[in-house]
Each structure stands twice: as C-alpha cells, then as structure tokens.
Image (spheres, rainbow, N blue to C red):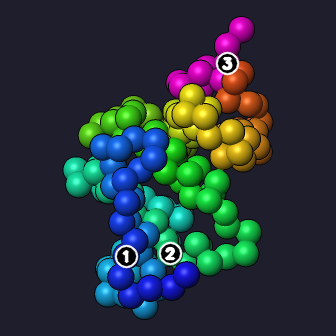
Amino acid sequence: MTSLCPDIFYNELDPRLTVMIVYPGSKEYEQVSSQFMKSGHAFLLHEAKVVVVDGSVISEPWFSKEHLLVIQAHEAGHYQAGHAVIGNSSKTHIQMEKEADFIGYNLLKSGGFEEAACLHFEEYQLRYGLSPDEDTPTGEIIV
C-alpha cells in the first residue's frame, strides 16, 4: 500500500507507543528518510513515544504482518529498556540492539504472537548465534 498520509495506530505490544507508517512520496517521508538510512526499517522517537516505520518496506513481497509485529516488538524493547533516555551509556550500539531484540522476542512470546515470535527467534539466532531462550537481557549466557 502506498499513501500520502501516514497510517497511525497503537503498538500492539506496548500501548504506550504509537506506530506511524510513513510512505514514500509524502512530505513526512522526506523528513525521516535519512533516519531510515541509518536505522533500517524503523526507529523510535522516545520522547514522543512514536515508532516510525518505513512504508516502502510494507509493500515488499516478503513483508508480512508478523514482520510488522517484530518491528513493533523491537522498538518497544528499546523503549522499555530506556535506551534513548540512557543516551551515551556504557552499552554499545550492538548491546542495545541485542537487548531490544531480547525484550521484543519476549513481548511477542508472552503476548501469544506465536508466528511473529518464531520469526523473531530465527532472526535472533542468525544475528547473535544463540537463541533468545538461551540468552539474558544483558547478553550473558545462562549457564
């Protein structure tokens, strides 16, 4: 779907957050496209409590509602971990991404979003070399 107006709805995993899908061709897309180049398919405006999703990815043939749930879960993970509030903490970018993925996976799993949790599980394994069930939020392996 392509639209000149953003789609706006509440994050299914954390209703404190609003999701805004911004489509190419809109004035809003021009304002945020450079951030998509840095952040990927989405980013979080922490203070505004808004997850901004790149609308160009929504129309890709591989993209599903589960992918959108994984994006919402990941960004909710950043929000719940307070990553934007922490700012320049001792955590690296990779550590914060992993923590957001860990929290996001657990949000999907505990929320009963089985298909999206499976998708996120596979992505987690590919990215980090272990399953989120074997990991901890800090990235320390459970022994």
> Distance of mark 3 from mark 1, alpha carbons?
40 Å
* Tag 2 residue: 55
> Distance of mark 3 from mark 2, alpha carbons?
36 Å
- 1 and 2 marks in contact (CB < 8 Å): yes
- Depth check, mark 3 against mark 2: the one in front is 2
Q: Secondary structure at mark 3?
A: loop
| Amino acid identity at mark 3 | Ile
> Residue 56 — which label?
none
- For the residue carrying disc 2, how many other residues have a C-alpha within 10 Å: few (<14), some (14-19), or many (20+)? many
Asked whether 21 or 127 is in front, the reply is 21
Residue 94 image offset from top left, x and y in percent: 55, 43
Quadrant, the C terminus: top right
* Tag 1 residue: 6
Q: Earlier in the sequence, mark 3 or mark 2?
A: 2
Residue 139 image offset from top left, x and y in percent: 59, 26
* Tag 3 residue: 141
In this image, 23 relative to 108: left or right?
left
| Amino acid identity at mark 2 | Gly
Q: Which residues are magenta?
A: 135-143
